[in-house]
Image (spheres, grey):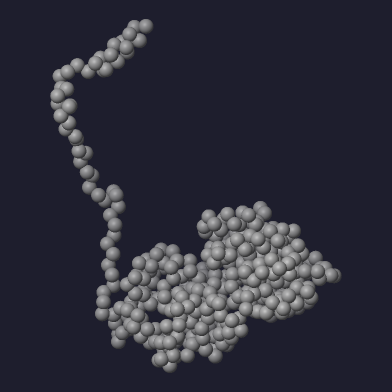
Amino acid sequence: MQFEEFELDDSLLAAVADAGFSKPTTVQSEAIPEALMGRDIMAGAPTGTGKSAAFILPCLQHLIDFPKRKRDGARILILTPTRELAIQIGDQTRQLSSHCSFSVEYVIGGVGYEQQEQAFADGVDIIVATPGRLMEYIRNKAFVGSTVEILVIDEADRMLDMGFIDDVGKISDATSRRGQTMLFSATLEGLGLEKFAASVLNDPVRINSQAPRSEKRKIPQYFFYADNLEHKNKLLEHILRLEQVSKALVFVKTREQMAKLRSFLDSVGISAAYLQGEMEQEKRINAFESFSRGDNSILVATDVASRGLDVPDITHVINYDMPYSADVYVHRIGRTARAGKKGVAVNLVEAHDYLQLAKFERYTGEKIERRVIDELRPVTRIPQFKRKKKKEDKPAERKRVKNRQRDSLNKGRPDFRAKKARKENSSQQEN
């Protein structure tokens, strides 16, 4: 299938060609035709398979097909969980509308209120927003949702994880006059997500896209066993100094852990950019752009960057701290091997992390192989966990028979109840 088969406007096809898209991905092939028909969409697809273009192109085609002379408010609203993802989607929207005259604005934290309110006042075609900041404008009646014609909810499962679902539900209520809703997510698992989708979608087309082999990105996954924190730091330093590690994304769990790691990297002369929640927007943008441009070849980040971070040519994702859940693990390592490039996932594992590996292997269906650096071999053994015996593995227990004194004392005595029952039974037969 080619993009021309979707009957998109020539201006969009020209932008698609400029972006270097040769042919639609699986999720684009399945979602775009349905979205162009105005159907509500509930789509799940692995990270890095082109979900953004799958909803951006139908939204732009809608604006072309139904032009409005007067700009009285946003017509398209796209919700994303993080600022970084909002910026990336906004940039791609501008790229795909480069041959049109549509306006695109962000509504995200860390940006001055006056600057964003001015965008509302001037009128805008497409708003890409994070739920928390948009809710502030709704409460202050600075944003009117009645003009929204299409609502897109991206990374819906991440919205649920981050506690944004209530806000997204209120935004859905504020845009209740819309004609179409599209919900995209890396996974469609979980009762919470299903319940939420049922509340915002109207008779949706359900798409659960599994990328074919040609689109799947095989990511080699390794782990190094660390005796303790000091050993883990030495392993990380060694890996980051390898020549083949040209662009590395290092994940930590918390801001406190990031501060400790930053102190260590500074002490050994390794320069890195840092990205975490609750940073000033300007600092977050500077860190992201510094890493994207290659000014810094290492980015240390909390899970604020595990979803939607689309930086080309990341060669290594390093889990300095292992994540709690398998889906977060998948999204972390999905930051590498994008757009057909090769990439590697490296895990630094301490004793308390070891059980997580088996869980992640079951979830991904792929083996996480062990690696050892000769000069940094661990001196402690990997913990061994005994398999719990299943119930059927246990030998059958003999049923204990209770010997009661009253039973032996009553032996030979007539059972009057049984005798009465036999008598009643025989009289019924005679009748």
* Residue 430 visible in image: yes
Residue 301 versus residue 213 in the image, above or below? below
Instruction: Point out the image quarter for the N terminus.
Output: bottom right
In the image, residue 226 lies at what x, y percent? 33, 78
Viewer-nearest residue: 136 or 197? 136
Residue 420 versus residue 29 in the image, above or below? above
In this view, the residue farthest toward the right is 69
Q: Residue at x 17, y 31 (%)?
A: 404
In-image side of 222 versus 298 (left or right): left
- Quarter where residue 64 is shown: bottom right
Instruction: Point out the image quarter for the C terminus.
Output: top left
* Residue 35 visible in image: no
In the image, residue 14 lies at what x, y percent? 73, 77
- Quarter where residue 183 is shown: bottom right
In this view, the residue farthest toward the top is 431
Q: Residue at x 48, y 66 (%)?
A: 327
Viewer-nearest residue: 216 or 308? 308
